[in-house]
Image: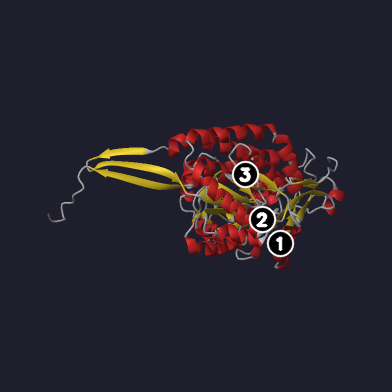
Amino acid sequence: MVAKTEPINVYALINGDRIKTENMSPRENPTHPDEIVGYAPLNTREDTIKAIDAADQAFKTWSNTPLEERINRMERAIAKLREANDEITELLSREHGKPLYDANGEMWVSLSWMEFACQKAKDVLKEEVKEHEAGKTYIRHEPIGVVSAITPWNYPISLSTIKIAPALIAGNTMVVKPSPFAPLAVSKVIDIIASEFPPGVLNLVHGEAGVGEELTSNPKVAKIAFTGGTNTAKHIMKAAADTIKHMTLELGGNDAAIVLSDFDLNDERAMRRLVISNFLTAGQICMIAKRIYVDKSIYDQFVQKYIEAANKWIRVGDPFNPEVTVGPVNNQRQVAFVQSLVDDAKGKGAEVIKLGRILDPDVFEKGYFLQPTVVLGADYKDRIVVEEQFGPTVPILPFDNDEHAIELANDSIYGLTSSVWGVEDHAIKVANRIQAGTTMINTAAVQGLDVQFPFGGVKQSGVGREYGAEGLLTYTDTHVINVPKNGDLPYIPE
């Protein structure tokens, strides 16, 4: 364990100024809840209006800044973030509970995407000129305006930079609101990025319901980029309706993993990938595999091999211990929710098997820890199967045949990601029929993510796409300028 440090303060950032507030919200260390890692401000609705006004004013100039300059500024911010990587990841690990390798992984994904956005922006955002029989057409990708970004606690840095990089490169201005459950490291990141841009281009506020309501209803906000729960998104859509705002919503998921009859049970690396896809970040990832369906012909053997692989990989403890692979749950509320799902399944007769090793029982007992579990014998309609657990537990259930597996996977209000495990041709045939934004073959979750390609959900898992070229274009309006050869139409009389 790394020794306790003095609490840090982070501030709001409005029009280039760091804003202090009288009321500050503490963020504890979920591994050692008696340690306060730092304090974030509790901004008011009035603060939020000032931030939106600053972004609106800055947009008038920033939107006309040459694309090359926007890219250069973002590249300089990336270089600064690389220099501060160790400081940021240690702070993230301490306030969030991620093991250090996981916190470093989040920074790696964030920087990979930011670099991709810089590299591809000129090609993706360039003006197209099409000459054709009817004349000439210009297709321009123009910035939308002020973007409000509301981000969650599970991947606070990557789920902020996924919005910040394309929005600013495309010529928009922003106000970002992080989650109070992980406000510190992401504030450092935003502060570093903002230092490379003119005042008002990137603003930061913290706070509670009033701040979020202003960010989603203020008429000067042209687009909302939100990652979080589906129920919250419904309120956001209602708040935005009066002014018909653009939206990108990346929401909940209850991602199915389908293990086919031809899956190689002796492939230890594939089995390890599946275990990691359930328990990375203590299961607190929107795109993690949350329910496993296994062909009944291999079910018993699979369960045995899975438990062996899980017991080998899962080592629970202090995130600063290099042996640890699974840290604490981020907050007490989430601990209680996940435990309620496990208890519900157990109360209905399911078998709950604890997985892995607890490296330090004293730390485990005092922190927000849950020992990872696998649940066997649950009903297909039990809460632990149909609800998004967002924690270190997973049910494994049998299916009769491929048709049955597809039916089970699609029987959900969600459709974020999914995975199919087996011989490639067979797996792709099944994958083609799954209702999801992304389906991965013989891998899942972050292990199968590629920032070059679009990511997002279907059904109640979201609206729009992030990453890839689409992740840049979603922060633009398409402006078509037509220059016809002859403005006369043949069906209109002289």
* Amino acid beneath label 3: Ser
Specify which label sits upstream in the sequence, 3 or 1: 3
Residue 158 is marked as: 3
Give how far across and how far down residue 404 sits, in percent: 52, 59
* 287 sits left or right of 319 in the view: left
Q: Are marks 1 and 2 in contact (CB under 8 Å)?
A: yes
Percent x, y of residue 402: 50, 54
Quadrant including the N terminus: top right
The answer, for residue 13, to whether it is visible in the render is yes
**Depth check: 278 or 65 in front?**
65
Where is residue 33? Give x, y as percent: 82, 53
Please tell me how crowded label 2 is: few (under 14), some (14-19), or many (20+) other residues with Cα within 10 Å: many
Residue 255 screen position, x and y as percent: 58, 54
Q: Residue at x 72, y 39 (%)?
A: 89
Q: Earlier in the sequence, mark 1 or mark 2?
A: 1
In terms of depth relative to the viewer, which is nearer, 117 or 60?
60
In this rendering, the label closer to the viewer, 3 or 1? 3
Secondary structure of residue under mark 2: loop
- In the picture of the structure, the residue carrying the numbered disc 1 is 337
Q: Residue furthest right?
A: 362
Q: Residue at x 65, y 55 (%)?
A: 47
Total labels drawn: 3
Q: Is residue 297 visible?
A: no
User: Is 381 left or right of 242, judged from the image as shown?
Assistant: right
Q: Residue at x 54, y 42 (%)?
A: 168
Q: CA distance from mark 3 to mark 1?
A: 25 Å
Label 2 sits on residue: 390
Callout 1 environment at 10 Å: few (<14), some (14 to 19), or many (20+)?
some
How far apart marks 1 and 2 lie (CA) works out to: 9 Å
The amino acid type of the residue labelled 2 equals: Phe
